[in-house]
Image (cartoon, rainbow, N blue to C red):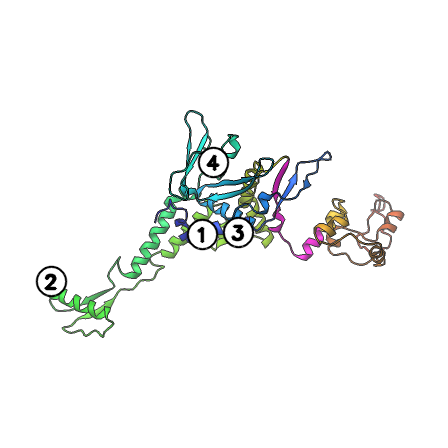
Amino acid sequence: MNLASIDSPMAIPAVWGCVALIANTISMLPLETFKKKNDRGVALRADDPPLLQKPGSDLTLSEWIHAAMVSVLLRGNTLGQIGGFDSRGYPNSVNLLNPDTVGISVNRETGVVEYRFTDPSGKPGAVHHEWRSGLANADIWHMRGMMMPGIPIGLSPIAYAALTLGVDVNSREFAGNFFEGSQMPKAVLETDQEVNQSQAQTIKDRITASMQGRAPIVLGAGLKFVPITIKPNEAQFLETQGVTGAQVCRFFSVAPEMLGYPAGHSMTYANEEQRSLDFLKYCVGFWLRRIEDALYQLLPGKQFVKFEPNELLRTDAMTAASIRLQELAGKLRTPTEIREQDLNLPEMTEEQKEEINLVPLDMNVIGGSKLGVKVNNTYNEMQNPGVANPSNTGKPAEPTPGEDEK
């Protein structure tokens, strides 16, 4: 197996699982466009430019992001040729290239990175330059993965994991050959009589011919057919695969238990949200920022893009309601913002506001007891300033006893 090929490592389940998990997760997250901060220091939402509406000639935005992530994860680099420009001279499409068909080098005289790739006719392409270099013929978009100082080419986890992956491939090849019988004999013929070389060869040929034709085997002269069997666990095939899979996961910063491999530690997650948070923080977050920075150079003016990771951290209805109450209690958001942004509901009409006011104030608020929200403590504050009523009954709270009374 050629590990230098972009798709060969995908034959290894751990590599396939890691690449699919990261690429699928990132491609499903919303990507929004903003303008740089205004006078009040707030970034404003902007309409998506044509580049994000249809980034490639034949790919949707989610497909384009997915393909870009597969390339950078397996080869360390994502390369694209700019397909067109708008009236202001900014790219309006980027067609992704197979990184294995592009040669990257640094001009010794100018220090500029140069790209050469073969065009559809099979002829060697001309020299191309990266868009951010500012050169006249710059038409290459380049997003790099892990980097070393002074090297303009991204590094792939596959290159560094080649030895580990080689062990995995070799163990699978050995397992296949073992069960095919090429690594050791399938059976032993035993006899209590003396057999010379010629007789042994004749007996073996007849047994082999019978086995291939699935015909009954007739043994004589004290011959005994003893098949050789061994459990895969005894050959440590499963153990080898498990250890190698966990190591591959760590190359991609993916928790091994997310793909069903033993983690080698006793740490567990309290809930699914905590697992998703760790996955976002220690794995996906790096790639989100890398894509945002790489796309920023293609956008006009003060525009920039930002992923919305909250889609990855979706909570249950009860938790979401508690969070909204916390935001209301802390005066971080208004009810109108919550209705529009979270619930996709318009602002309340005057009739709806009057109807809301008819709801009893002593009604239990979802999560209120956990948040310390007192929906009917106005009377308490009037009678006992600064003293809250933990029972939330609407009755005056008992005054705090003084030192003498204690």
What amino acid is labelled 1 in the image?
Trp
Q: Residue at x 83, y 55 (%)?
A: 353
2 vs 4, front mark: 4
- C-alpha gap between disc 3 and disc 2: 62 Å
Q: Quadrant of residue 37?
A: top right
Question: In the displayed structure, would residue 363 be above or below residue 76?
Answer: below
x, y percentage for residue 318?
A: 69, 57
Question: In the displayed structure, would residue 5 be above or below residue 358?
Answer: above
Choose between 210 and 241: the one closer to the eye: 210
Of mark 2 and mark 4, the one earlier in the sequence is: 4
Q: Is residue 371 left or right of residue 84?
A: right
Whether residues under marks 1 and 3 lie with C-beta atoms below 8 angstroms apart, the answer is no
Examine the structure image and report whether residue 309 is included in the region drawn in magenta.
yes
Q: Which residues are magenta?
A: 302-323
Q: Is residue 119 left or right of residue 343?
A: left
Q: Quadrant of residue 84?
A: top right
Name the residue that disc number 2 marks: 197
Whether residues under marks 3 and 2 lie with C-beta atoms below 8 angstroms apart, the answer is no
Name the residue that disc number 1 marks: 16
Of mark 3 and mark 4, the one earlier in the sequence is: 3
Name the residue that disc number 4 marks: 147
Name the residue that disc number 3 marks: 24
